[in-house]
Amino acid sequence: MTVDPSYAEALRETLSALSPMAAVQVDVGASAGLVLAEELFASVDSPSAPSSSRDGYALRSEDLPGPLRVVGRIVAGGAALGPLRAGEAAEILTGGVLPEGADAVVPEERAERTGDRVSVRGSLTAGSFVNVQGRDVAAGVRLAGPGQVIRPALAGLLAAAGVSALAAHPRPVVGVLATGDEVVAPGRPLRAGQLYSSNLVTLAAWLRGFGMEVHTALVGDRPGGIRVASEALLDDADALITSGGAWKSARDQTIEVLKSCGELVFQRVRMTPGKAAALVMVGGKPAFCLPGGPPSNEMAFLQLALPDLLRLAGRAPTPLPVRRARLARALDSDPGWTHFVQAELVERDGLQWATPLRDRSRLRAQAHADGLIVVDEDVTHLPAGAEAQVQLLPSG
């Protein structure tokens, strides 16, 4: 257990506490976005036979320029046509299999047909507009291996190569629990002093944006209710994220409940916002207790919880791309603390500039930030115009 670790120490502890979830068999059509857990090889050629890449006429290039007698019509997936003899051609649609003897296809826009005769304008050589057997992938070729993210085009390649199912790491199912007597689910009436649970909506949106299934619940500040809701969510989920009750006042019950259910990995992190974050392992599953303030809640999620969830899915624990940008105004920070500052990004004079949003409304700053300026724990001042590391937030 570590109390008050640095941000780097907390992140290292979260990642070392977890490993990718066990692989499962997945239909290739549902595999995009998952991480492959096996070597895959093509079992068939694609195309499985020489075929036409255009609508036109299959022919023997040695018979050109014609005219040639049209002896049939070939469609993709249709019955095969007999061998072409000297002076013959066959009308063919894209994907149709070339008849025996044919070695080229003339596109219809370069063909002149009169009745059952067709001639070719311009030159044409053997192999023109023909997809040779195995052009896209040949049987036996390695297609992908463990650790590779299955992108949509790769899923299509796998299907074309005869792969119908594969072993991949599943995305974790995540339970999200918002706590607090003052917190109300969106859509219900508010009493004085209450507020809607924007954290619940924000966290669920982030998780679904990464393709994860989310189960949510909202309870008051009573230990019994928090325990029951946490256990119910963890029964159906691979990880738990809680919002609120993470500090050490008498009303902060969530962290105490989680600590009584499992093993504390770390508590309170030298990062801002988000210092009240904690990680507890409950029955081998990670439970992140995040602070209730919206900026702290989202920042602790992005910097500590989300990398861990990606690790469970077998992905690299780096959810946000990083680039360099110049600061539009100076930043000061406390020594020994890692600071994350919401910022607007603009390009000016060929350079990327980051404007800190520290003085804005908390929720408006979250909603309009393009990136997060990272100020390392050993840096106390960054002057205006200095280069800084910026994590890029998704634009949609």
Image (cartoon, grey):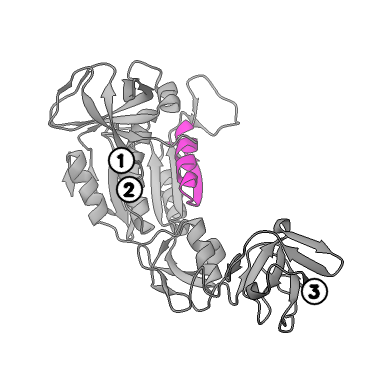
Q: Provide residue 158's location: percent of width, then percent of height.
A: 50, 68
Give the camera-side residue of 282 and 175: 175
Q: Amino acid at mark 2?
A: Pro
Residue lying farthest to the right in this orientation: 115
Residue 20 colored magenta? no
First along the sequence among labels 3 and 2: 3
Marks 3, 2: nearer the viewer = 3
Graded by Cα atoms within 10 Å as few (under 14), some (14 to 19) or many (20 or more), the crowding at tag 2 reads many
Q: Provide residue 324's location: percent of width, then percent of height.
A: 27, 32
Residue 345's quadrant in the figure? top left
Please state if 384 lies on the left or on the right of 157 as rendered.
left
Which residue position is annotated with label 1? 303
Report helix, strand or loop for mark 1. Answer: helix
Q: Provide residue 279's location: percent of width, then percent of height.
A: 28, 47
Q: Amino acid at mark 3?
A: Arg
Q: Residue at x 47, y 51 (%)?
A: 212
The tag on residue 307 is 2
The tag on residue 69 is 3
Numbered range of the magenta stretch: 197-220
Q: Provide residue 306's location: percent of width, then percent of height.
A: 36, 46
Q: Residue at x 74, y 80 (%)?
A: 81
Q: Amino acid at mark 1?
A: Gln
Marks 3, 1: nearer the viewer = 3
Q: Are marks 1 and 2 in contact (CB under 8 Å)?
A: yes
